[in-house]
Image: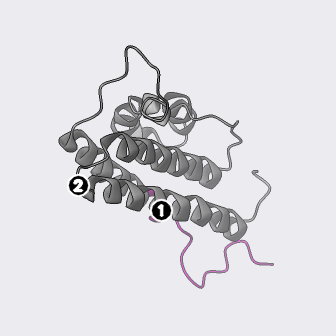
Amino acid sequence: MTDLDPRDRWHRVEGWIRHAGDDARIARGCLALDPPAYGGAAYHCQQASEKLLKGLLVQAGADFRKTHDLDTLGEAVLPHFPTLRPLLTIMGAWTAWSVAYRYPGEDEREPEPSIEELSGALDAIAQLESILRSLAPPPNSDVGKQ
């Protein structure tokens, strides 16, 4: 992935941001339901986080494998963006949200996160999205053009 020019790389990053934004919007919609669908919101928060972390890896030119594990993705992001450690640590705890509320039959289900936890997750997702967007190449620059 390191062989992409910066504009092509950013175009791929934008795809990750767009899909993460959809997941965050769906999570907010789940919270607006009556009654709220906390498990659905948690799932989409996990998905949005995963996509933003993958976007950071694309921006860094780093290869990554297919995974839903936010700790694994965070560990891969950290060498490229060490200042994100506090945010990555918070998000790592959301890995279980990718499956915990989507399937019946679990005797000892993961407790659903509270509205406060999910609101905090959505705030953290917005913060990470903002950080990722700040890495965009300047508009109308000649970076990567031949």
Task: Locate the C terminus and report the quarter of the image it occupies.
Answer: bottom right
SS at circle 2: loop
Residue 60 lies in the magenta-colored region: no
Q: Is residue 43 left or right of residue 112?
A: right
Say whether residue 14 is left or right of residue 35: right
Residue 115: x and y in percent read 20, 44
**Amino acid under label 2?**
Asp
Mark 1 surroundings: few (<14), some (14-19) or many (≥20) residues within 10 A: some
Q: Please, which residue is most extreme toward the top here?
A: 107
Residue for badge 2: 34
Q: How is the image coloured?
A: one colour
Could you tell me which residue is drawn at 24 percent across and 39 percent down? 117
145 within the magenta span: yes
Which element carries disc 1, helix, strand or loop? Answer: helix
54 sits left or right of 48 in the view: right
Please identify the residue farthest to the bottom as the structure is shown: 140
Residue at 50% from the left image edge and 36% from the top image edge:
78
Residue in the image at 76% along x and 51% along y: 1
The image's mark for residue 22 is 1
Left or right position of 141 against 126? right
The residue lying toward the viewer, choosing from 30 and 77, is 30
Task: Name which of mark 2 and mark 1 comes first in the sequence.
Answer: 1
Q: Quadrant of residue 40?
A: top left
Q: Is residue 145 above or below residue 28?
A: below
Answer above or below: position of 106 versus 115: above
Q: Nearer the viewer, mark 2 or mark 1?
A: 2
Give the residues in magenta.
130-146
Residue 31: mark in rendering? none
Q: Amino acid at mark 1?
A: Asp
Q: Local crowd at mark 2 within 10 Å, few (<14), some, or many (≥20)? A: few
